[in-house]
Amino acid sequence: MVAPHAAGRSIGYNNHELHRRARAVFTVLQVSDTHLSARIPRFNANWAVAARVLAMEADCLIVHTGDAALDGPDHEEDLAFAARLLRSGLGPQGQRLRCTPGNHDVGDPPSLKPRQPATDRRVAAHAAALGPASWVEDVSGWRLIGLNSQVLGSGTAAEAAQQAMLAEALLTLGARRLAVFLHKPPFLDDPQEPVSGYWTVPPEERAALSPLFDHPSLRLVASGHLHLARIIRRGDVVHAWCPATSFLVGPALLADPHSGARTLGLMRHRFLEDEVESELVPLPDAEPILFDPIAHEIYPPAPA
Ligand SMILES: [Fe+2]
Ligand SMILES: [Fe+2]
């Protein structure tokens, strides 16, 4: 079980687990923050460990919530390499891979004054390698929505297209339940919290997403980016932080883990009729690489 959280209640299985599994309509395996590259292959072996775990799963949809590549914005070859490695590692299940981009795939929104701004060109490069950055998929009474959190507030054509897609998806939702996948979580502890800087969706952009995040049919918000594992429930909605397969972010770079667990792993989401059961799938055979002391080696500072 993942660490409980003060603002919600922790989620785990109880004696009714077998009964619940029998009622599961379908399963999504979420993987995140693989940070793959042929140029700097430091985290590729940990992906191989994750791929072996995924290969043992029965047929399911696999959703990657971003930072698939080590440095996609400046090295499109990292995106192509990540796509090849992800699909080959997944074998036949690679056909059922959906991706949403992260900051290390397409860059960041302008509110962060980033060195690598998210642009339409960068989103298109990601799409060429890993498929659409924003998507809708209907499965057995559920509508799954993949969002590109990196273009929020960017003024790009990709952002406008995503807003139109989202409006249409909500307009035609019908009786379906909703689940959302995106790289950055909409908030850390509270939807009304002030600026969280690098780690969440820009607060000034949350209003544009409120028709989705305040929707009564929403049941799951699944994100990555923090390299932490945490599962909490707020009302009817499970908020799941999928940990990375690649590396751990230590206290030097992320002082407060907000009740998240610093661990490597995946997330399994079992979709029932009207709710989602989420659980951490740990990767005990992965190397627990601590990023803090090697950050400048992996992501060298830009020349002055
Ligand atoms: Fe990451
Ligand atoms: Fe990220």
Image (cartoon, rainbow, N blue to C red):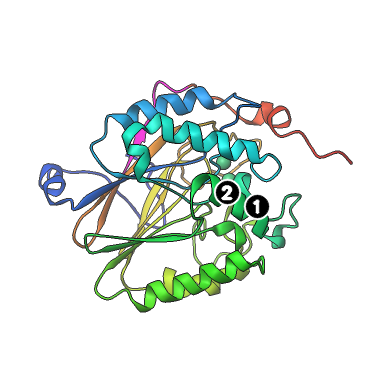
Distance in Å between CA atoms under marks 1 and 2? 6 Å
* Spot occupied by residue 236 in the image (x, y as percentages of width and height): 30, 64
Q: Residue at x 37, y 33 (%)?
A: 90
Asked whether residue 295 is drawn in magenta, I would say no
Q: Residue at x 47, y 41 (%)?
A: 32
Secondary structure beneath label 2 = helix
Q: Quadrant of residue 247?
A: top right
Taking 139 as reference, is 42 left or right? right
Q: Amino acid at mark 1?
A: Arg
Residue that numbered label 1 is attached to: 122
Residue at the extreme right of the image, as rendered = 304
| Residue 176 drawn above or below residue 51 | below
Q: Residue 182 shows which numbered tag?
A: none
Taking 147 as reference, is 281 left or right? left
Q: Quadrant of residue 72?
A: top right
Residue at the extreme front of the image, as rendered = 128
* Spot occupied by residue 110 in the image (x, y as percentages of width and height): 71, 61
Residue at the extreme bottom of the image, as rendered = 171
The reply to whether residue 108 is visible in this rendering is no
**Number of marks in picture:** 2
Is the residue indicated by label 2 positioned so its CB lies within 8 Å of ligand 2?
A: no
The reply to whether residue 275 is visible in this rendering is yes
Q: Amino acid at mark 2?
A: His
Query: Which image quarter holds the N terminus?
Result: top left
Magenta range is 279-286
Query: Which image quarter holds the C terminus?
Result: top right
Q: Residue at x 11, y 47 (%)?
A: 22
Number of other residues with Cα within 10 Å of mark 1, as a class: few under 14, some 14 to 19, many 20 or more = some
* Spot occupied by residue 265 in the image (x, y as percentages of width and height): 41, 34
CB within 8 Å, label 1 to label 2: yes
Residue that numbered label 2 is attached to: 126
Taking 48 as reference, is 43 left or right? right
